[in-house]
Image (cartoon, helix red, strand yellow):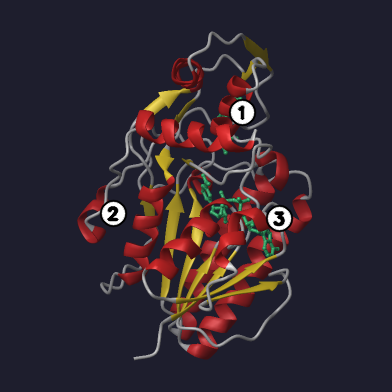
Amino acid sequence: MSKKRVLVTGGAGFIGSHLCRKLLEKGCDVLCIDNFFTGRKENIAELFSNPYFEFIRHDIIEPINLEVDEIYNLACPASPIYYQSDPVQTVKANVLGAINTLEIAKRTGAKILQASTSEVYGDPEHDVQSESYWGNVNPIGIRSCYDEGKRCAETLFFDYFREYDVKIRVARIFNTYGPYMRPDDGRVVSNFIVQALTNNKITLYGTGQQIRSFCFISDLIDGLIRLMENDIALHTPVNLGNPTPINMKSLAETVSGLVGKTIDVEYLPLPQDDPKKRQPDISLAKKFLDWQPKISLEQGLIQTINYFKTIV
Ligand code: NAD
Ligand code: UDP
């Protein structure tokens, strides 16, 4: 039997490179597209010797014709400092990227999974966010290129399903971390670890009371693949994330403790529209995918610290 041909857009990024690796392990023929905006060749270097791994340097805002069985659409910068550095490109990557990948799915009949985000909930009015919540999003702020771009991409996915019967999956991914994040990625876990290892001050924005829930990368990859493979047509977005909340001040203390140093904290202003609390309700993923995270924050941080020790 021929191998399943799987396209991963954004495959040289943090999540994408783990996904490519896992799909190859599972016996798939993997086609990775990336423009290296935030992705790195180092993330996929060891895959180039595998005959079932192919790479195309391509910007997903341009159409492309490919024959595949499944598509994971991940191409979009995820860190606020990167997605805000070129907001128009961020909107294009989300909206045109969704249209271009959905067109491939429409023509080939491939299943297609969108890497959506908890950011579609904006600054939520509910402590715990479930998929039925429509969100509280500023449409004209500095995060809007990402939030509204991802919301429009979800709209396009559901319109392609309703209008053309495209086989869609939409994962709302909550904060995920792990090896292969860029040291200069700018997101909180990599920032704190790199700062702790290089002995600088940890930069805490605002009072540090804002809450996030962090999912280790191996758990997320398992969830994404389960969602793609699930044959119950789930015509709803599905939250994927770790439901255990922690505030950023406690995260800074946990990272310092695991690195084994006393680190000073430098308080910096809270960025505009920074959400106060993100915590996923994962009942849908538990019920339909039999999925929940297995790796504790401490276990995941230790693996991530060990990775960063090798590169900083
Ligand atoms: P990342 O920045 O490490 O990876 C994104 C990849 O997409 C990079 O390799 C980048 O070069 C590539 N890319 C960006 N624009 C592109 C374009 N126009 N054409 C082709 N490639 C392009 O981020 P990540 O954390 O791996 O996130 C992957 C996906 O998951 C993103 O869509 C992101 O929005 C989503 N997501 C991630 C998280 C998280 O916590 N990591 C949370 C929610 C959603
Ligand atoms: N944050 C911080 N210090 C940093 C980076 C981020 O205190 O060096 C905070 C940020 O203000 C936010 C949280 O950590 O409240 C998570 O930020 P991140 O950029 O990782 O992801 P977000 O969930 O905001 O998209």
Residue 34, x across and y down, in percent: 67, 65
Q: Nearer the viewer, mark 3 or mark 1?
A: 1
User: Circle 1 is placed at which residue position?
Assistant: 194
Q: Element under label 1?
A: helix
- Location of the N terminus by quadrant is bottom left
Q: Quadrant of ligand 1?
A: bottom right
- What separation in Å lies between label 3 and label 1 (alpha carbons)? 26 Å
- What separation in Å lies between label 2 and label 1 (alpha carbons)? 32 Å
Q: Element under label 2?
A: helix
In the image, the residue with mark 3 has its CB under 8 Å from the nearest atom of ligand 1? yes
Query: Does residue 194 sit above or below 209 in this rendering?
Result: below
Q: Is residue 292 left or right of residue 30?
A: left
Which of these two is toward me, 282 or 132? 282
Q: Mark 1 and mark 3 in contact (Cβ < 8 Å)?
A: no
Query: Does residue 180 sit above or below 229 in this rendering?
Result: above
In which image quadrant can residue 9 be found? bottom right
Three-letter code for the amino acid on which mark 3 is drawn: Thr
Report the disc number at residue 285.
2
